[in-house]
Amino acid sequence: MSEWVRVCDADSVAAGTLKAANAAGQPVVLANVDGDVYALEDRCSHEAFPLSDGELDGDEVICLHHGARFEACTGRNKGLPAVRPVKAFPVQMRDGGIYVEV
């Protein structure tokens, strides 16, 4: 059964940035792409390093450790060395907070 979990305040993830968060025990990375916030599993599918250590380039999350790229809104792998996507989670902005469905 899924649930919506408040992970942080809406204003704590500035446009063009990443933020590590915890959604009921699930590590996620929040990506703010031009005001739209997306949540991905905070673990690169290549070597399991945290994606939140990386950076956001347009709408792509770049893993700091080996340069793998993932589409922020879907988790689809966009660049080697990752050959598998990462899980994407639904996000809602409400009551001044960011909620992730896990």
Image: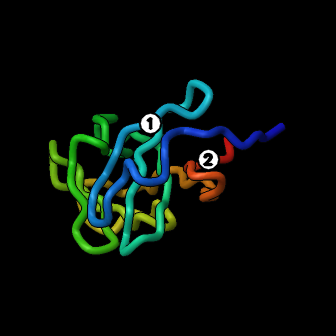
In the figure, residue 60 lies in which quadrant?
bottom left
The residue tagged 1 is 21
The amino acid marked with disc number 2 is Val
Decide if residue 15 is on the left or right side of residue 90: left
- Tell me if 20 is positioned left or right of 56 in this view: right
The picture places residue 66, in percent across and down from the top left corner, at 15, 48
Q: Position of residue 15 (x, y in %)?
A: 32, 65
Q: Which image quarter is the C terminus in? A: top right
The quarter of the displayed image where residue 90 is located? bottom right
Q: Earlier in the sequence, mark 2 or mark 1?
A: 1
Q: Nearer the viewer, residue 39 or 76?
A: 39
- Residue shown at the point (41%, 45%) measured from the top left: 29
| Quarter of the image that includes the N terminus | top right
For label 2, count other residues whose C-alpha is less than 10 Å away and answer few (under 14), some (14-19) or many (20+): many
Residue most extreme to the top:
25
**Spatial CA span between label 2 and label 1:** 10 Å
Residues 51 and 84: in front is 51
Query: Residue beneath label 2, please?
Result: 100
Please name the colour scheme applied to the rendered image.
rainbow
Say what amino acid the circle numbered 1 marks: Ala
In this image, 3 relative to 31: left or right? right
Q: Tell me if 39 is positioned left or right of 45 in this view.
A: right
Residue 84: quarter of image: bottom left
Residue 43 is situated, as x and y percent measured from the top left of the image, at 38, 39
Above or below, comparing residue 48 to residue 95 in the picture: above
* Helix, strand or loop for disc 1: strand
- Depicted 6 relative to depicted 73: above or below: above
Image coords of residue 6 (percent x, y): 61, 39
Q: Are marks 2 and 1 in contact (CB under 8 Å)?
A: yes
